[in-house]
Image: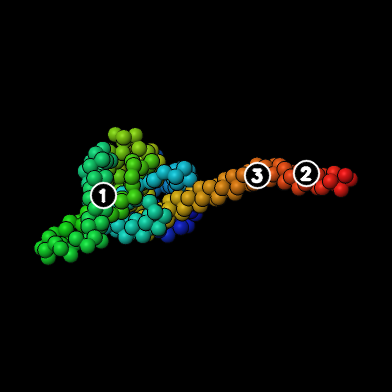
Amino acid sequence: MPRVNFEELLNAGVHFGHLKRKWNPAMAPYIFMERNGIHILDLHKTAVKIDEAADALKQIAKSGRKVLFVATKKQAKEIIADKVGGVNMPYVVERWPGGMLTNFPTIRKAVKKMTSIDKLMADKSWNNLSKRERLQITRQRAKLDKTLGSIADLTRLPAAMFVIDVMKEHIAVKEAIRLNIPVFGMVDTNSDPSNIDFVIPANDDATKSIELITDVMTKAIQEGLSERKAEKDSEGSKEKRTRSKKAEPAKAKAKKEDDVVEEAPKASEEGTTKE
């Protein structure tokens, strides 16, 4: 069963591309027609691509790895923070910090700095600092949180990257390609899909379009996480059953030994009576 139907895509305006004069010829296979100087995307192909991307993301989440979402454009920020934050995946909605992936250890140091500030603020020595020092540290913490707070749990490179507007986020895409990280992306008619592993031809400017596709992707991730949890629970209960089965023969052996010990004194008592 498709994850999204044709009518939903149509109502969200996913089919609207850019002006004909702004198009990228590489997007020709995904364009259905041109109307009033605007390219219209083929929603049948979009629906297929959405399913492919969602299934792949589900498997990544099921394997316990992370997917990094990147969307710094104004109309996508709140949607990504809300929906992606809901499935505990890392995301970037402020300016992309150059070298975030290619220079990942430096980014991790900045995140650790944030943690050390939190420890300092919780410590008694915090009150011994001057008002000016406390203000400077608080501002530094707020600045770090704004840019890196949403990736604080990303302890290693992500298994995949999901990008909204691959043209705007070209630096992030280049870094992912350099490190062989698969890229999923909403690709409009003015963008180049050749470097994107999972292309979703869609309107990347409309809020409704972004919300619909992000919703499908996060639901797929949630499915993967739920299946992973169910498998772990199943393995745990299986292990318990195995342990109890192994324990049963040992219990039986111990009981037998106890019975032998109880019988021995009885035998000696009988001997004494005969005498």
Amino acid type of the residue that numbered disc 3 sits on in the rendered structure? Ala
Camera-side residue of 98 and 133: 133
Q: Is residue 245 visible?
A: no
Q: Nearer the viewer, mark 3 or mark 2?
A: 2
Where in the figure is residue 140, as x and y percent of width and height? Answer: 17, 56
Amino acid type of the residue that numbered disc 1 sits on in the rendered structure? Val
Q: Secondary structure at mark 1?
A: helix
Question: Which label number is shown at residue 247?
Answer: 3
Question: Which label number is shown at residue 98?
Answer: none
Question: Which label number is shown at residue 264?
Answer: 2
Residue at the spot of label 1:
111
Badge 2 or badge 1: first in the primary sequence: 1
Task: Judge left or right: residue 197 versus residue 251.
Answer: left
Which residue is depicted at the point 39% across and 45% down? 66
Q: Secondary structure at mark 3?
A: helix
Amino acid type of the residue that numbered disc 2 sits on in the rendered structure? Ala
Task: Judge left or right: residue 18 versus residue 222.
Answer: left
Give the spatial CA distance, label 3 vs label 1.
Answer: 47 Å
Q: Nearer the viewer, mark 2 or mark 1?
A: 2
Badge 3 or badge 2: first in the primary sequence: 3
